[in-house]
Each structure stands twice: as C-alpha cells, then as structure tokens.
Image (tube, rainbow, N blue to C red):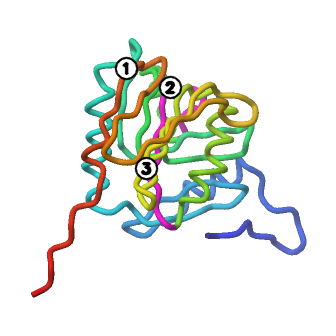
Amino acid sequence: MLERPTIGGTEPPGFEALLDLLDELNVPDGYKAEIIKGNIVVSPWSKGYYATVMELVCDQLRPRLPEGHRISCGPFLYVFPGSERAYGPDIHAAHSRTYRTTSNRLDGEGLSFVAELTSVSTRDDDLTDKVETYGRAGVPVYLILDMQEEQATALWTPSAKGYESRLTVPFGEKLQIPTPFDCTLDTSGFLPPEEPEES
C-alpha cells in the first residue's frame, strides 16, 4: 500500500491529483492499482482459477442483464468522486452509455452490478470500504465472493450506509440475485481445484 505522500509539510494531494498519479503510475506486471481511503493501493492479480469463477458469473448473469447493459471482467477503473474512491472491480455490469468515453475513468454510478473476488490482501476492503462506497453510489447489487471463507454474499437495497439487505450461502449452493437481475446464481463451480498429491 502506498500512503498519501506529503511534500514539505504541504497537504496530501486531493482525489483528482491521486487519479492523475494513478494514470502515471507504472504498475508492475501482475498487479492492479485502486484508490481506497485516500491511498493508492497496489494489489496482485487473481489466482488462475478465479478466471473460471468470473466467467461462470458472467455467463449466468448475461441473459438477465437489464436492457442496454453489458457485463465484463475486464480491467476498468470506476470512479466515485463523492467518496474519493476509484475501484477496478473483478466483475462489473453497467449501461453501455457508461463506456462511451475516451477517458479511462468510468462513472461508478453507472454500475448496475459489481462483484469482487477476495484475496488475502484485499479482503478487508472488499468486505467494508467497498460495501459502503458501492451502496452509497446506488449500485443495485454487490456480490462478494469470499474466496478464503468459500462463500458468496449478495448485497442489495443500497443506502447511505451501504446495503440494507444481504444473503450468504456457502460455495456449492444456489444464491438468489435480486432485481434488476432476479435470477439464481449456481456457485457449484467456485471452489478451488484440488491440489495434486505429491508422490
């Protein structure tokens, strides 16, 4: 984690300055950068099997997307100026107009769905800071796939404090994804592959 720099006793840079720093940051291969709690946070890319999990989520939700919306697990930066946050969610769905820009800073309020697959380094923020930020921005559904605890949590009914409603199931069970998707997510393929036994 890179803390906000202070130069000669001056104030730390504001949110826009941090976004500019993020644009100029030379992130090492295998890492992504976000702005969380006033800091630029660099975290490693996901484990290999996470790709399968992300594809399974996209495949199941794509037929249920609201009209004009798209879902992807590509690396995009969504900005939340009111919260001074900028996240690169693992899975995201938004109206196609959200992508009609030449900027690499997408409007976080355009999201209709977001999902994060936790890692050891990002888990706390996925479970706390992002819950509050996505909820305040009015993102209808936030899905947390807790890869350490092997459980899926759907959050909905966004509010100023985060989300008012939640449902958690262990991997392997079905999870109801509420409006605007109104479908069931099968999590049976979300468990890690078994490691081969050493001989």
Neighbour tally class for label 1: few under 14, some 14-19, many 20 plus, Cα within 10 Å:
many
* Tag nearer the camera, 1 or 3: 3
Of mark 1 and mark 2, the one earlier in the sequence is 1
Q: Residue at x 57, y 34 (%)?
A: 166
Please give the residue where the numbered disc 3 appears in the rendered image. 151
Examine the residues drawn in magenta and state their main secondary structure.
Answer: strand
Give the magenta-colored segment's residue range: 105-120
Amino acid type of the residue that numbered disc 1 sits on in the rendered structure = Leu
- Quadrant in the rendering for residue 4: bottom right
Please give the residue where the numbered disc 1 appears in the rendered image. 65
Q: As rendered, which of 146 and 59 lies closer to the eye?
A: 146
SS state under label 1: loop
Amino acid type of the residue that numbered disc 2 sits on in the rendered structure = Ser
- Quadrant in the rendering for residue 76: top left
Residue 36 screen position, x and y as percent: 65, 55
For the view shown, which residue lies furthest in the left direction?
A: 199
**In this view, 57 is above or below 66:** below
Q: Decide: marks 3, 2 in contact (CB < 8 A)?
A: no
Distance from label 1 to label 2 (Cα)?
9 Å
Give the position of the C terminus as an image quadrant. bottom left
73 to the left or right of 99: left
